[in-house]
Image (cartoon, rainbow, N blue to C red):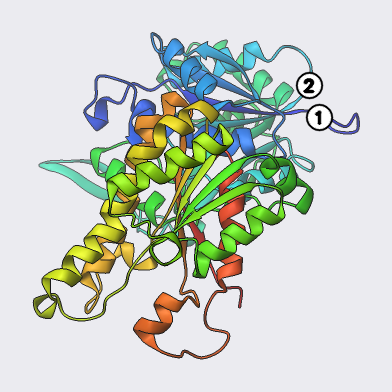
Amino acid sequence: MIAESRLRRVGVVLAGGVGQRVGLNTPKQLLKIAGKTILEHTLDVFDGHPEIDEVIVLMTPGFVTDAEELIRRNGYTKVSRVLEGGASRTETTWRALSALGERECDVLLHDAVRPLIEPRVISECVAALDRYEAVEVAIPSSDTIVVAAPGPRGEIIRDIPDRSRLRRGQTPQCFRLSVIRAAYERALADPEFPSLPTTDDCGVVLRYLPDVPIYIVPGSERNMKVTHPVDVYLADKLFQLAENTAPALTDEQYRAGLEGRTVVVFGGSYGIGADVVALARGYGASVHSFSRSENGVRVEDAAAVEDALARVYAATGRIDHVVNTAGVLHMGRLGEAGQHTIEETIGVNYLGPVNIARAAVKYLMETHGHLLLYTSSSHTRGRADYSLYSSTKAAVVNLTQALADEWACQGVRVNCVNPERTATPMRLRAFGDEPAGTLLSPAAVARTSLDVLLSRLTGQVVDVRLTR
């Protein structure tokens, strides 16, 4: 419930673009990167932000139904309406403002194709609206900006402004509803407005309500706008490198989410897997652990994996979460590796997750459950002396994102935990003793794993970092 002492806060996601500059004949906000559409990534942030009360989506004409299906599938609780956008950014914004009614509120207008918006920026915008009626998000310009003018044989430089005073505008752009609506009413009454170079909402306020100060909230270099083909590639890589996090839960939330649920852990005999088993059991889950040393189940053996899951289902009648922590790490040059080493590394680290995914999906579809895999920080760049390990871990990241996409319609979530260096027996065998305090504990990784299992995340690589 919204406290009577404050205004409601509405996030307006402007998704009315077509994507012609990206080379698409469908809206670019429906393009998939990192396992989800751009629109879903953006809505994840706004719908999940604790300081946003309501979300409205303005969608490209002809694609409202597509957006509504994404919202239904993801279970977004704050999205109240999907409206058809206009022929221009100005018309789309005006439709949103008109739909908000007469009741005063704070409005955060955000480009749907800025999917890397950070919750911190939204929080700072909300705080700024307590003191100002208009807020812009901007970052300093790292490039020199030149003012061009026509010359006899092409453009020439007319001026070079002082870079220290220049900022690059981003979104959200945030306003008191009455202020931005008054600015647009004056703009739309001005016959010269359509030909003016004003392209954003703060520009409308600056021109038509010049006495209203516009406060600047520091943005982020990551808050890029997906406009050109290269932006799609960059955004996808930024998502892979992002430190995605699941909200840390309380003991009561763990128990509410796990009690009476069935959790299957492959690789549960030691290390991270053993701690996942102990934690989940402690919160009331029915946990079933399988590993080569514990009960002879090898993840690279598809039949053994299928049999293990079938036995659990027969005993419990449901499987809610499947976790795979099984892995092997062999050090050495690829050219010096024996065939057994190559086959075991690929079999356990990559074929294992594939086998588990294939066998588990039919059970997870029944419960709208969760498959949790694990990667390594080496997935972002191949490392000498453990090329097989790092390349198989990179494959697991791609598998996670692909399966999240494939299984979204069935309500099955797939995520990947990326722990920093962790004090596991596998690491000890490969690297020997390392200085105390430089490694994560398996228990810390296990707790984050439960946070992810009980979250709404899907298609994400969730980092676990050592607190220093």
Query: Where in the figure is residue 270, as x and y percent of width and height?
Result: 50, 69
Establish if 394 lies above or below 365. Answer: below
**Considering the numbered disc 2 on the image, is that residue within a helix, a strand or a loop?**
loop
Whether residue 86 is visible: no
Q: Is residue 275 left or right of residue 124?
A: left
Whether residue 62 is visible: yes
Of 416 and 134, the residue lying toward us: 416
**Considering the numbered disc 1 on the image, is that residue within a helix, a strand or a loop?**
loop
Q: Amino acid at mark 2?
A: Glu
Of 156 and 449, the residue lying toward us: 449
How many residues crowd mark 2 within 10 Å: few (<14), some (14–19), many (20+)? Answer: some
* Residue at the image point whose x is 70% and y is 43% from the top: 259
How many residues crowd mark 1 within 10 Å: few (<14), some (14–19), many (20+)? Answer: some
| Cβ–Cβ under 8 Å for marks 2 and 1 | yes
Residue 81, located in which quarter of the rendered image?
Answer: top right
- The residue indicated by pointer 2 is 104
Numbered mark located on residue 280 in the image:
none
* Residue at the image point whose x is 38% and y is 83% from the top: 429
Quarter of the image where the N terminus is located: top right
Residue 333, located in which quarter of the rendered image?
Answer: bottom left
Residue 109, located in which quarter of the rendered image?
Answer: top right
- The residue indicated by pointer 1 is 7
Query: Where in the figure is residue 23, as x and y percent of width and height?
Result: 21, 28
Label 2 to label 1, Cα distance in Å? Answer: 7 Å
